[in-house]
Image (cartoon, coloured by chain):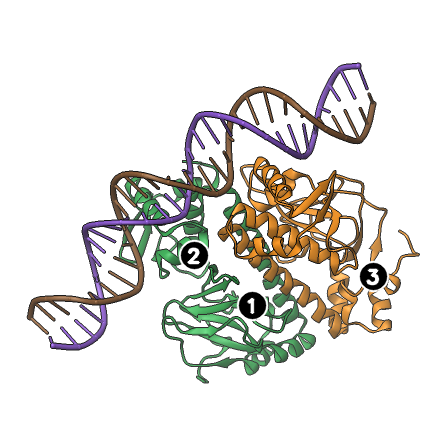
Chain colours: A green, B orange, C purple, D brown
Amino acid sequence: MLPSIKCQSCSINQLCLPVMLVESEIEHLDSIIQRKKPLNKNEMLFRAGDDFEAIYAVRSGCIKSYTISEDGVEQVTGFHLPGEIIGLDAISREMHPSMAKAIETSSVCTIPYSKLEMLSGEIPGLRQQLIRVMSKEIHDDQELMLLLNKKSADERLAAFLMNLSSRFASRGLSRDCFNLTMTRNDMANYLGLAVETVSRLFSKLQDRKYISIKDKEITIEDMTGLSKLAGTRCN
Amino acid sequence: MLPSIKCQSCSINQLCLPVMLVESEIEHLDSIIQRKKPLNKNEMLFRAGDDFEAIYAVRSGCIKSYTISEDGVEQVTGFHLPGEIIGLDAISREMHPSMAKAIETSSVCTIPYSKLEMLSGEIPGLRQQLIRVMSKEIHDDQELMLLLNKKSADERLAAFLMNLSSRFASRGLSRDCFNLTMTRNDMANYLGLAVETVSRLFSKLQDRKYISIKDKEITIEDMTGLSKLAGTRCN
DNA sequence: CGCGAGATTGAACCTGTTCAAACCGTGTGG
DNA sequence: CCACACGGTTTGAACAGGTTCAATCTCGCG
């Protein structure tokens, strides 16, 4: 518990649950939130089958969420950046159907759901924001389905990079230079491709001067080109 | 407006928003719901870009929801049976990002969102159920992503049929004999396959006595076999 | 009867997978 | 301090699942 960190002063509170709240309401929300010590790389936040107690807001770092099918195949369902909420898929069954793991040192805010649910009865703005966040997740998932179902490997990777880029930008970070903290494996899994394919595509995108990569750091050299690739083009 | 139809007497109210409500609350909910005349086959319920006014509950028939990407490619995102709620992806942007069309004669209940939002401040059970429905949709979408990303064509079709089967069963209908109201094209699109592939797979599943098809009516002859196919197997 | 949308079947093709090998960087223990 | 092991990445070559294109079939409907 780190009492010094509060929603009121959190740099990303405009991306998170407090968006529509006034000062006094934020204080109220803040009072139910628990903040534990940061998770180390590869540490689990929750596992499939765990009782549903709380939803989580990413404060820093990056959390990977994924499911495992009966036959043991892993499916990465998302990479969550600061301000994003995790665990919403657990509400309906009161049990986590998916897992969440830190892919780099990350801190999260724990929001006990029963308290949030009560509070949302009192604060209309909180209720609205929670529902908006869920609605956005539904919408984003549908976009992802389109991506996975209808696009070629090139388009998928380009779209993935553009998506990351704009999410970093909306957090006040650079839109054309950022770290790819996840492994090639995780990316490939998320995009429904083989690792080898992703690796080849990175090489190709570099050859064609769309991007350049140094270690984990990617620089988008030709944003319009890449976005065109993500959209319509086929090769 | 058909005043004779009410949530209180609706045969599927235990699958719909009223699940957790007591009689008086259901009445209240019912009072804000509008019921128009049924939609004909191929009639649109809403279009992408439409202002978000309401969410919809399917009462009878089947509604297909789908998106269209910038480059005009259609992606079917779901087939909605009675009791299911449509339009939840529109809340966050106050605009419909997707389309919904009746694929057979269907009736829907229109639930004006501003009124629902207000009512959900007064009725905790309604708020909870709305959030559960959204949570379930998030979860279902993730399962679908796994299906599209990690499974072979055979597994996809088998899983699709099993999914329909169990949804019909939970509506008190036969779990092993039902109508496939959607076209092969829609199924293929939804599953991320070519029409031809779906057609071939149906033939194959019939040859191997998993199912039999007569016109639009499918009978599942070997439920355990089909579910095994949907799960682990590969050919 | 004949038209047209949807469904089925066949055959060639292509994108992305799989298998295999090598490479690179980092942390660990002798 | 170096050797080595190991996870992650890259590259090459063969393979396969599903697509694409084209032709035919079926059925409902004017």
Q: Nearer the viewer, mark 2 or mark 3?
A: 3
Measured from the top left, where is residue B154 in percent x and y? 55, 47
Mark pair 3, 1: CA separation? 34 Å
Q: Chain of mark 3?
A: B
Q: Are marks 2 and 1 on the same chain?
A: yes
The residue at the point 45 percent across, 36 percent down is: A233
- Asked whether the residues under the numbered discs 3 and 1 touch, taking CB atoms below 8 Å apart as contact, a structural biologist would say no
> Is C6 on the left-hand or right-hand side of B157?
right
Three-letter code, disc 1: Pro
Q: Chain of mark 1?
A: A
Residue topped by disc 3: B32
Mark pair 2, 3: CA separation? 41 Å
Q: Chain of mark 2?
A: A
Three-letter code, disc 2: Ala
Residue topped by disc 1: A97
Of the numbered discs in the image, which one, if any, rests on residue A169?
Answer: 2
Residue A12 in view (yes/no)? no
- The image quadrant of residue A64 is bottom left
Please tell me whether residue A200 is drawn above or below residue A38 in the rendered image.
Answer: above
Estimate how packed mark 2 is, as few (under 14), some (14 to 19) or many (20 or more) residues with alpha carbons within 10 Å: some
Measured from the top left, where is residue B91 in percent x and y? 65, 57
Estimate how packed mark 3 is, as few (under 14), some (14 to 19) or many (20 or more) residues with alpha carbons within 10 Å: some
Mark pair 2, 1: CA separation? 31 Å
The residue at the point 43 percent across, 56 percent down is: A169
> Is A191 on the left-hand or right-hand side of B64?
left
